Amino acid sequence: LAVGHPWGQIGAVSAGIITSLGSIPLRWRRQSVDVIRTDAGLAPGSSGGPLLDAEAGVIGLNTMIMGGDLGVAIPSHVVDEFVEQRLGRID
């Protein structure tokens, strides 16, 4: 489930499946980042919302749309590591 505010719709939810796990290159940093690809419908305004599993656990942060019908999310563990590096450990 992808939750967000696409096109200004508050708290919109779209369902889908995880289509793949992988990574995408970050050209400006010459490295790649782990991603979750989903067919849950993302639209402008969905970025920053949670990607949830079937038990409503947060598994990722919706980030972008690829090819019009594929959503990309950053996995929760990657977000946690980023926050910890920048702000320190948060429990």
Image (cartoon, grey):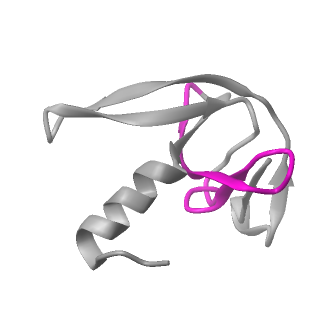
Residue at 43% x, 78% y: name it. 90
Residue 48's spot in the image, x, y percent? 56, 62
Residue drawn 64% across the image and 56% down it: 46
Q: Residue at x 37, y 28 (%)?
A: 24
Looking at the image, which residue is at 63% across and 61% down? 49
Q: Is residue 78 left or right of residue 73?
A: left
Q: Find out whether residue 65 is within the magenta segment.
A: yes
Name the spot of residue 11 as percent of width and height, x first: 81, 69
**Which stretch did the figure color magenta?**
44-67
When asked about the image quadrant of residue 57, the answer is: bottom right
Is 47 inside the magenta-drawn segment? Answer: yes
Residue 19 in percent (x, y) is at: 68, 22
**Residue 18 at x, y = what percent?**
70, 29
Q: How many labels does the image show?
A: 0
Q: Looking at the picture, does residue 30 appear above or below residue 63?
A: above
Frontmost residue, 44 versus 16: 16
